[in-house]
Image (cartoon, helix red, strand yellow):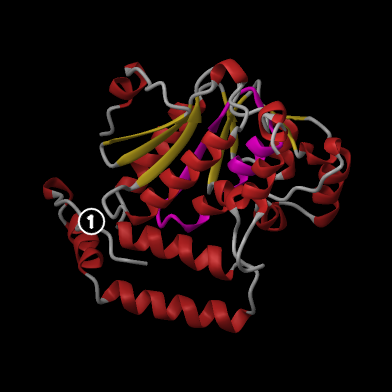
Amino acid sequence: MLELDKYMDRKMPKDCVSLKVENNIAFVTLNRADKRNALNMAMFKSIDKISHELRRNRQIRTVIVQANGEDFCSGLDVKSMMAKKSSMVTLLKKWLPGRANLAQRVSYNWRKIPVPVIMVIQGRCWGGGMQIALGGDFRFAASNASFSIMEGKWGLIPDMGANLALRELVSKDVAMKLAMTAEIISAEKALAYGLISDVSDNPMHEAMQLAEQIAERSPDAVAAVKKLYQKNWLKAEWRMLATETYYQLKLILGKNQGRATQRQLNPENKKAYFARKKW
């Protein structure tokens, strides 16, 4: 069993974004509660660094992203980021048009981590905060959470990579409406649209329950499912069919598929899974 009480009681570091791994779960915490976790340059760089580190970690089974304070993230720290034009250049520059820049990586990088990423959301999840949340695989929201694609308020388009998730989660007219109006919507409406996975009085508890379920499954199979769906969800039928066959053969030839079978046939003597293969 995962030690929920132990985690919930622990004190957070004072870094703007912190990382702690317990029981093979990586907890990423936004720590600018006094600024409603608004994104400054330090937060962009920290999220980018931490998400890259987690992508290489083959021991973790789940990532949970949460935030200290009343709000998940209220968006861009406009005063901080607009004070220097060079800050915006740093966020948006890229060597190749198809590659993610720093602004996009705080959302896009979660999609590249070969384990499920669960977002635990309370209060404001606006602008850049919503972009971060949409990069996850699951979003559990408190009933007081509110959501907004707020870039339109500033005469901008959503440009932090979450458009990839939007086209998978909602219809085009809903995405356009939210992006054009910068409307603030409730957790219930976000759930109805399909933007979040569930609304709960205790979203962290829901996240931990899901992490427990995932921990019972082969880390290779979980990684394969994530990559299969992330890479092929909107691709041609032939590509999905070909890729699922290739991944299945790769799983059958790996150690963890046999270990999963043993765990089902002999549940009283469950052996730990091997380290996840590279996916």
Q: Please identify the quarter of the rendering in which residue 79 is found.
A: top right
Q: Nearer the viewer, residue 13 or 204?
A: 13
Q: Residue at x 41, y 21 (%)?
A: 14
Q: Residues within 10 Å of mark 1 (few under 14, many from 20)?
A: few
Residue that numbered label 1 is attached to: 264
What is the span of residues highlighted in magenta in the rendered image?
Answer: 111-135
Q: Position of residue 275 (x, y in %)?
A: 22, 57
Q: Position of residue 167 (x, y in %)?
A: 72, 58
Q: Residue at x 45, y 63 (%)?
A: 225
- The quarter of the picture where the N terminus appears is top left
User: Relative to 142, is 25 on the left or the right?
Assistant: left
Q: Please identify the quarter of the rendering in which residue 76 is found.
A: top right
In the image, residue 29 sits, relative to residue 152, either above or below, namely: above
Q: Position of residue 3 (x, y in %)?
A: 27, 28
Q: Nearer the viewer, residue 182 or 79?
A: 79
Q: Residue at x 55, y 19 (%)?
A: 33
Q: Please identify the quarter of the rendering in which residue 145 is found.
A: top right
- The quarter of the picture where the C terminus appears is bottom left
Whether the magenta-drawn stretch holds residue 116 is answered as: yes
Camera sees residue 70: no
Camera sees residue 82: yes
* Amino acid type at image mark 1: Gln
In the image, residue 193 sits, relative to residue 143, either above or below, namely: below
User: Relative to 26, is 112 on the left or the right?
Assistant: right
Q: Residue at x 62, y 79 (%)?
A: 237
Q: Position of residue 112 (x, y in %)?
A: 48, 58
User: Relative to 187, is 114 on the left or the right?
Assistant: left
Query: Which residue sits furthest left?
Result: 269
Secondary structure, mark 1, is: helix
Whether the magenta-drawn stretch holds residue 243 is answered as: no
Q: Nearer the viewer, residue 87 or 256?
A: 87
